[in-house]
Image (cartoon, helix red, strand yellow):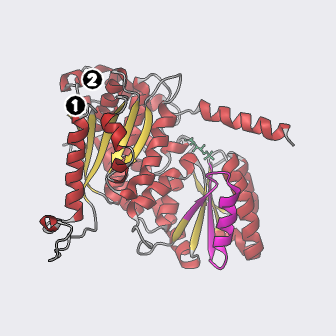
Amino acid sequence: MIKEIVKTTLLNCSLENGDILKYKKQVQDIHLALPQFELTGWLETPNQIQDDLLNSIERVATEIRACADILVVIGVGGSFLGARAIQEALKPYFGLAEHGIEVVYVGLNMSGAYIKELLAYLDKKQVYVNVISKSGGTMEPALAFRVMRLYMEERYGEKATERIIVTTDAENGILKKIADQAGYRQFVIPSNVGGRYSVLTPVGLLPVAVAGVNIHELIAGAKQAAQELSASDLANNDAYKYAVMRHMLYEQGYSIELLASFEPGLNKFHEWWKQLFGESEGKEKKGLYPSTVNFSTDLHSIGQFIQDGSPIMFETLLHFHEIEGDLQVPFDSRNEDGLNYLSNRTFNEINTISKQGTALAHSEGGVPIIQLELPKLDEYHLGYLIYFFMKACAMSACLLEVNPFDQPGVEAYKSKMLELLKENK
Ligand code: PA5
């Protein structure tokens, strides 16, 4: 029985259910072919991940929380976006989650100012480092690790070894070699899982466990998704429905998909989604450009364009029915601002109504809207949604006839940069 944890609907579209179901056979064929691609280990990660691994991640996370004030995570792209997305979505807006410590990220850019400030910020704090790189050779994290390793050795001497945890391939790469030689503790990135599909492996799980996230619940949600979204029948698979809807809109000439949420904690989740779809689909001069907005903030910046500007985009509204934490609008006898009519409402209720109003207005402005609804924003449903998007993305890229699991364009930038660095020695 499909429980519809993610409910996919069209709010305003020229698309009909009948049109969507025309893709039934194509979707079924791709569904059957998908496991034969390289780098599809993530399809089974939630089913295969052992309690032993989750427990050992939690043990290390408990140790880090006990011995450190801050965890510095080093990684870029798929090696950090997922962890930061989950952490930001579930942690309190101000301060730390219960049982969590501060988790910060480096190696995601090459700003000298950023890394210099980080080193100063670490002063007087007890530090652990988790360096994450599947290839082990990506320039941004490799440079950051060089700095952090020397810093840790200077501060902790031989004890630095205990405070550096490496997450990398089981066999290959420079980082693996360094970790073996130095005797750092290691977690493995499965060789059949690519970076942007790796958030439900130790890549994402260790940092978020340190931040106080319940990783058993996260995986339980993903496991339910893996079971429910294993249906090959488009009519019974909301991830595939979403993939087909966005594909059909692309075919109709829309070139931008705007993922829109109404909770600021989802900003970093948007970044993870953007990489997933952008790097999986943007190939061979094809693909929707994935962009994101956070409402109601962005209604006051980009809302005008969405409503009234070039008709190049459709919107995917992500809505969680239940958000922990809410506040009733207070009654004020002066009522100088005229807002007492809202004093029997909560902020979250008003936010939901603003979502409905936004959808109606944008529909009237001719913007097609796909709505993805989930019951609650918590570990379980986030785990479900992550798997949902990965499955939808793989299907969507295959509908475009591009390989969802490579990133030749990124390699091009890397080799040009290396050429220039070597030329200017
Ligand atoms: O999705 C991907 O494969 C990339 O975004 C990688 O995750 C990113 O380039 C980092 O690579 P690595 O983990 O090898 O350092």
Q: Quadrant of residue 423?
A: top right
Instruction: Tell me the kind of residue under disc 2.
Output: Lys
* Depth order, front residue of 412/186: 412
Residues marked 2 and 1 touching at CB (< 8 Å): yes
Q: Is residue 388 visible?
A: no
Mark carried by residue 235: 1
Q: Position of residue 236 (x, y in %)?
A: 23, 34
Identify the magenta region.
104-133
Q: Position of residue 275 (x, y in %)?
A: 49, 42
Instruction: Tell me the kind of residue under disc 1.
Output: Ala
Disc 1, SS? helix
Quadrant housing the N terminus: top left
Q: Quadrant of ligand 1?
A: top right
Q: Which residue lies under the disc numbered 2?
A: 24
Q: Is residue 213 above or below residue 332?
A: above
Q: Is residue 201 left or right of residue 10?
A: right
Q: Is residue 309 visible?
A: yes
Q: Is residue 336 above or below residue 41?
A: below
Q: Is residue 117 above or below residue 254?
A: below
Q: Give yes or no for residue 102 being in the magenta stretch.
A: no
For this orientation, the residue located farthest to the right is 425
Disc 2, SS? helix
Mark carried by residue 317: none
Looking at the image, which residue is at 46% across and 42% down? 274
Q: Give yes or no for residue 108 being in the magenta stretch.
A: yes
Quadrant housing the C terminus: top right
Q: Is residue 317 left or right of residue 397?
A: left
Looking at the image, which residue is at 76% across and 38% down? 418
